[in-house]
Image (cartoon, grey):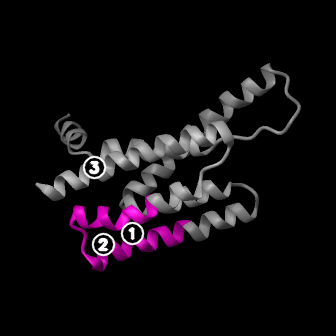
Amino acid sequence: MLTTTIHYGLLIALAIALVFAAFTDLRRRQIDNWLNAAIAVAAPAFWWSSGLSLWPDVALQLGVALAAFVLLAGLFALKMMGGGDVKLLTVLALWIPWDGFFQLLVVMAIAGGVLTIVMGVWHVMRRQRDRLAIPYGVAIAFGGLWVLYFNLLPAATMAAGAA
């Protein structure tokens, strides 16, 4: 019972952190390092409350996070992605199983495309000449919340299985 309470408390904390990341990225175009660090530090407690074994479960989570960081750091080096976005996706890979992480990437890409179109139209309507900056943390948070709701919460998982 205690581990279940801790487990859901951690999921709620992650959801709150994702919403906070989205708002700060929208407002300041920045995702704070302390927020990414807090998400990363809480991951081992989530692994424990989920009943993950060190091998292969935790090793797989660490491997996916490392692979995500390497690939996304390459995109950062090419100036295609912000540093906070790279860190946020990397720490999310510590929480979300690899198949759910791919789902997060797909949902994030779709949400990011919609966000880019909406912000582009808004930018043109306001006749702004400066460079358009997309707060991609919003799309990352949306993808993360999507995966949390549909994959990690039991009520949503049972309802999806019953349909």
Which quadrant of the figure has residue 156?
Answer: top left
Q: Is residue 159 visible?
A: yes
Q: Position of residue 42 (x, y in %)?
A: 38, 62
14 left or right, relative to 139: left
Q: Position of residue 146 (x, y in %)?
A: 40, 41
Badge 2 density bin: few <14, some 14–19, many ≥20, Cα 10 Å:
some
What residue is at 50 percent from the left and 51 percent from the top? 105
Label annotation for residue 9: 3
Label annotation for residue 140: none
- Return the residue nearer the eye: 50 or 5: 5
Dominant SS of magenta comes to: helix
* Separation of residues labelled 3 and 1 (CA atoms): 20 Å
Tell me which amino acid carries mark 2. Answer: Asp
Magenta stretch holds residue 64: yes
Q: Is residue 44 above or below residue 156?
A: below
What residue is at 38 percent from the left and 54 percent from the top? 100
Residues at circles 1 and 2 in contact by the CB criterion of under 8 Å: yes
Q: Magenta span covers which residues?
A: 39-68
Quarter of the image with the C terminus is top left
- Return the residue nearer the eye: 95 or 63: 95
* Separation of residues labelled 3 and 2 (CA atoms): 21 Å
- Return the residue nearer the eye: 135 or 151: 135
Q: Position of residue 89 (x, y in %)?
A: 52, 57
Q: Position of residue 51 (x, y in %)?
A: 21, 66
Q: Which residue is mark 1?
A: 61
The residue sitting at the left extreme is 1
Q: Earlier in the sequence, mark 3 or mark 1?
A: 3
What residue is at 45 percent from the left and 63 percent from the top? 40
